[in-house]
Amino acid sequence: MNLTKLFETQTKLDEHIMQEYPELQGQNNLDWKLLALQVELGECANEWRGFKKWSKDQEPRTRVACQPCNGSGLLSFVVKKTCRFCNGSGTVGNPLLEEYVDCLHFKLSIGLDLGAHNWMKLSKYPVANENGSITLQFLDVHSRSLKVVEEIIRMESAPSEIRDLFTQAFECFLQLGAKLGFTWDEIETAYFEKNKVNHERQNTGY
């Protein structure tokens, strides 16, 4: 896990956003970033769908079929011509992974505001374990994130305690990724791809 590279990449995006919205410069932006993180976590859970016990459709949204080849990976079954739109994979997106890396963007941005790029140390990317359900993991991520919010607002904790809380919340978030079945390589690749999209959105007045 190259956490340094992730923080450096997020720094460039945050700086780009600040250039486009100069009113954000010189102020505390943690409140809206923390709220945005909660919203993105909800959107991630929505793509997972496992909590929707009232629905017969609880399959995670992990695959968007390529329209030109109809998810087959081939533009021509006769000559076995590989689809250039999906490069033969039959899929052009993973909504669940995309929402997860949206969360990661805000996790990193909040970490930068807290100075975590200077002090946060993480263990290796966790391996999914059977302790607790994915639903409980989502709730744990929410709970730990809110705990960080509460302590920042009250500022009753020592800086070292807030650092510990944020690190634990970050590791809990990584554990969620493992439970959802993502490898760190998949997450990093998706993060860098979405980061480019986010830069383009700033350039086009998104």
Image (cartoon, helix red, strand yellow):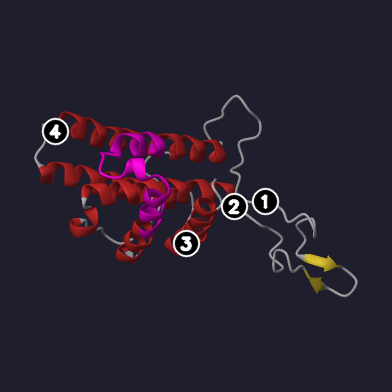
- Viewer-side residue, 197 vs 166: 197
Q: In what element is the residue under mark 4?
A: loop
Residue underneath mark 4: 155
> Is residue 142 shown in magenta?
no
Residue underneath mark 1: 64
Residue underneath mark 3: 192
Q: Earlier in the sequence, mark 4 or mark 1?
A: 1
Q: CA distance from mark 2 to mark 1?
A: 6 Å
Identified by mark 3, the residue type is: Phe
Residue underneath mark 2: 94
Q: Is residue 147 above or below residue 98?
A: above
Identified by mark 4, the residue type is: Met
The residue drawn where x is 19% and y is 59% is 118
Q: Do the residues bearing badges 2 and 1 touch, measured as CB atoms within 8 Å?
A: yes
Q: Earlier in the sequence, mark 2 or mark 3?
A: 2
Total number of numbered labels?
4
| In-image side of 74 versus 173 (left or right) | right
Q: In what element is the residue under mark 2?
A: loop
- Viewer-side residue, 162 vs 195: 195
Identified by mark 1, the residue type is: Val
Mark 4 closeness class: few <14, some 14–19, many ≥20 residues within 10 Å: few
